[in-house]
Amino acid sequence: MAQIREIKKRMVAVRTIQRITKTMQMIATAKFTASLARAKASRPYMERIRELVAEVAARAGDESHPLCLAPAKPAGKELILVIASDRGLCGAYNGHVLRTSLIALKGVKSRNAESVVETIGKKATAFFKFQKIPVAQKHQFGDRPTFEMVEPLAERLMSEYLAGQYDACRVVYMKFVSNSKQVPETMQLLPMRVPAAAKSDVKSSESLYEFSPNASELLNDLLPRAVKISLFQAVIDAIVSENVMRMIAMKAATDNASGIAKSLHRSYNRARQGRITTELTEIISGAAALE
């Protein structure tokens, strides 16, 4: 009897967990759909801005911009901005990002530089606190970050880089490739790199470009925009990856709970049948003893 009661309690608990994980899966699916739409809307603009920057920088000859150049006097410091989630239950999302951030920190150490860590997301902050790695600044953007929320951070990073406080600024985040593929990536935000393809195109082309306004003014306008939108796209990609990985994790948890519920139901039926068989045997044995 005690075994049957215990199995029934476990069945109730598993069904409750199944309902919770199913609800969380539905919420994650809705958030994923909304965040994916925002990411798709901003990605073409980001890609086109970066293409324009690459084209102008590659064809401008001797013209350059401080955001594309390494500091004249190295500061011996590099900033690592780590983007993780505020909540758990999203599979291996945070684990992949945080392991990649440790690799980035080792890379800074191998260059004989000092690392300065900033975080976006409570999980990253808690991780570095556990690792006893100091966090310079903590940022929170929530589930629906806007460009206006990310822009001040990008402006601050650019101003500090131009002031010579850092030799480089890198962003560690989960890049969204497709619904089935998310890749942890370390993106160099500053100094911005001009793609090699753009330079090769210049060498293979004999056409001359006349800039109006001049290349320097164009770079002064385009480069800060490119840095801001690149950081914003990284934040959006991280949100999309978090939601899709939470959706997959909650679906797996729901399926596992369903399997456990079926197994417990079979165990309950066997225990109940065994108890009935035992009682019938006792009744038959008692009746036979009275004869």
Image (cartoon, helix red, strand yellow):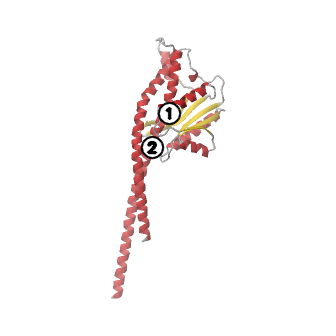
Per the image, label 2 sits on a secondary structure element best described as helix
Q: In the rendered view, tell whether residue 148 sits above or below residue 58.
A: below
- The residue that label 2 is drawn on is 245
Q: Is residue 210 left or right of residue 101?
A: left
- The residue that label 1 is drawn on is 149
Q: Residue at x 41, y 31 (%)?
A: 41
The three-letter code of the residue at mark 1 reads Met
Q: Nearer the viewer, residue 57 or 32?
A: 32
- Of the image marks 2 and 1, the number of the one nearer the N terminus: 1
Mark 1 Cα shell of 10 Å, populated few (<14), some (14-19), many (≥20): few
Q: Based on the displayed image, in which of its 4 quarters is residue 101 positioned?
A: top right
Per the image, label 1 sits on a secondary structure element best described as helix
Q: Nearer the viewer, residue 7 or 96?
A: 7
Q: Based on the displayed image, in which of its 4 quarters is residue 289 positioned?
A: bottom left
Q: Residue at x 54, y 34 (%)?
A: 171
The three-letter code of the residue at mark 2 reads Met
Q: In the rendered view, tell whether residue 281 sits above or below residue 128.
A: below
Provide residue 170's location: percent of width, then percent of height.
56, 32
Q: Based on the displayed image, in which of its 4 quarters is residue 108 positioned?
A: top right
Taking the view exactly as shown, the residue that stands out farthest to the bottom is: 291
